Image (cartoon, helix red, strand yellow):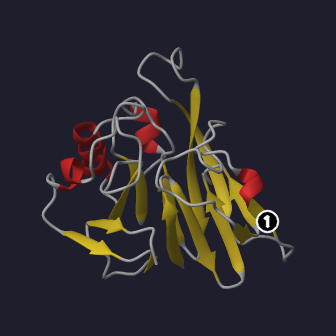
Amino acid sequence: MKIQYLGHACFKLISGDDSLIIDPYADDSVDGFGHLREEATMVIYSHKHADHYGVDCVKLIDGDKSKFKVDFIQSWHDDQGGALRGPNLIHVIACEGLRIAHLGDLGCPLNKEQKGQLTNLDVLMIPVGGHFTIDADLAADITKSLAPKCAIPMHYRGDGFGYDVLSTVDEYTRHFDNVHKVGNIIEINNAMPEVAVMDFRA
């Protein structure tokens, strides 16, 4: 299976002719990202804010029954039980014997039950920019607690992209020793680093 980073919190999982897009962003919803125009056999989203709910930007293509099995875990977009920003869905995706978790706009610590549902992960996609989500320090603590084979940070500010109020990815990666910067596509295998910082630009 391959993972393509499309920017912000949006990823495309590719397994043969089957594909799944997570949290597509709507046009002009996040500074520095172009208009998303993608095709996939399935699209899912963590919540209905524009920077995660650009489902109209993804053309659904016909195919056989999707190989992707998707489960979700209820969580919150803030640390006040959703009072500020509402609910958030964590997605756990299984395919090709792999387990991938996308935490969406998680805004609070995980509880014991949630952690129990996030074991044996091959890949963890985790927000690290703070302000709207958990911050870099909490994201690092969660990553170390869940111990995925590889973590991919998302939802942060970079040179020319992202919300000004977010921190940079460096605030997260400083907590880890095995960090590799990669392109916009990575294959899930045993050679993946502890943390892979993906570039949405091809």
**Is residue 26 toward the left or the right of residue 118 in the image?**
right
Q: Is residue 187 visible?
A: no
Residue 129, above or below 4: above
Residue 137, above or below 156: above
Q: Position of residue 62 (x, y in %)?
A: 87, 73
How packed mark 1 is, by other alpha carbons closer than 10 Å (few <14, some 14-19, many 20 or more), is some
At x 36%, y 30%, the residue is 131
The N terminus, quarter of image: bottom right
**Is residue 142 toward the left or the right of residue 16 in the image?**
left
Q: Nearer the viewer, residue 84 or 120?
A: 84
**In the structure shown, which secondary structural element does the residue marked by tag 1 occupy?**
strand
Q: Which residue is mark 1?
A: 59
Q: Nearer the viewer, residue 64 or 51?
A: 51
Residue farthest to the bottom, as pictured: 16
Residue 116, above or below 147: above
At x 62%, y 54%, the residue is 24
Q: Is residue 93 visible?
A: yes
Residue 136, above or below 78: below
Tell me the kind of residue under disc 1: Lys
At x 84%, y 76%, the residue is 63
